[in-house]
Image: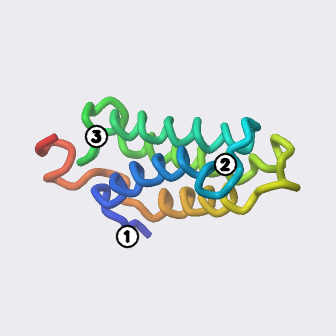
Amino acid sequence: MEIIPTRVHGVLDYLTGILLILAPWLFGFADGSAAQWVPMVLGAAVIVYSLITDYELGLVAAIPMPVHLMLDVGGGMLLLVSPWLFGFSERIAWPHVAVGLIEVAVAALTHRHAGDAGAAGVR
């Protein structure tokens, strides 16, 4: 069920990347631990691979949309399990779990190819 256009997905990508980078300060877990660094690194990665995705909001069409969506699912799943994988689930888990689930869901609901005016359109 592909109901999210790639242009909307692109906006969500950049917002998610920024949210993940800022989350440790927004939600009070900026303590230098894995709880802080996992979302920050994943947020930076989301922004970088979004910039090189072949869709409306990419700057360089280096990776196809299906690969981008696989990266979203992988990153979302890593974020989702990170509190237990890296041992900080007793302190903080809900932001990691919530954003991880949302990332996976958005990827599953997004169109697999950019619209006709998209990838070949103005960048």
Where residue 7 sits in the image (x, y, percent)? 28, 56
Q: Label 1 belongs to which residue?
A: 3
Q: Secondary structure at mark 3?
A: loop
Q: Tell which tag, 2 or 1, sits nearer the viewer.
A: 2
Numbered badge on residue 58: 3
User: Which of pointers 3 and 1 indicates the residue nearer the eye?
Assistant: 3
Placement of 103 over or under 51, stated as above or below: below
Question: Which label number is shown at residue 34?
Answer: none
Q: CA distance from mark 3 to mark 2?
A: 23 Å
Residue drawn at point x = 50 percent, y = 60 percent:
108
Mark 3 and mark 1: span between their CA atoms? 20 Å
Residue 61 % position (x, y): 27, 33
Q: Earlier in the sequence, mark 2 or mark 1?
A: 1
Q: Which residue is mark 2?
A: 79
Q: Nearer the viewer, residue 33 or 69?
A: 33
| Earlier-in-chain disc, 3 versus 2 | 3
Label 1 environment density (alpha carbons within 10 Å; few <14, some 14–19, many ≥20): few
Q: How many marks?
A: 3
Question: Who is closer to the viewer here, 91 or 57?
Answer: 91
Query: Does the residue at mark 2 contact the one at mark 1 (Cβ under 8 Å)?
Result: no
Q: Quadrant of the C terminus?
A: top left
Image side of residue 109 versus residue 81, left or right: left
- What secondary structure is marked by label 2? helix
Amino acid at pointer 1: Ile
Q: Residue placed at 73% from the left, 41% from the top? A: 31
Residue drawn where x is 36% and y is 65% of the image: 4
Horizontal and vertical percent for residue 28? 68, 54
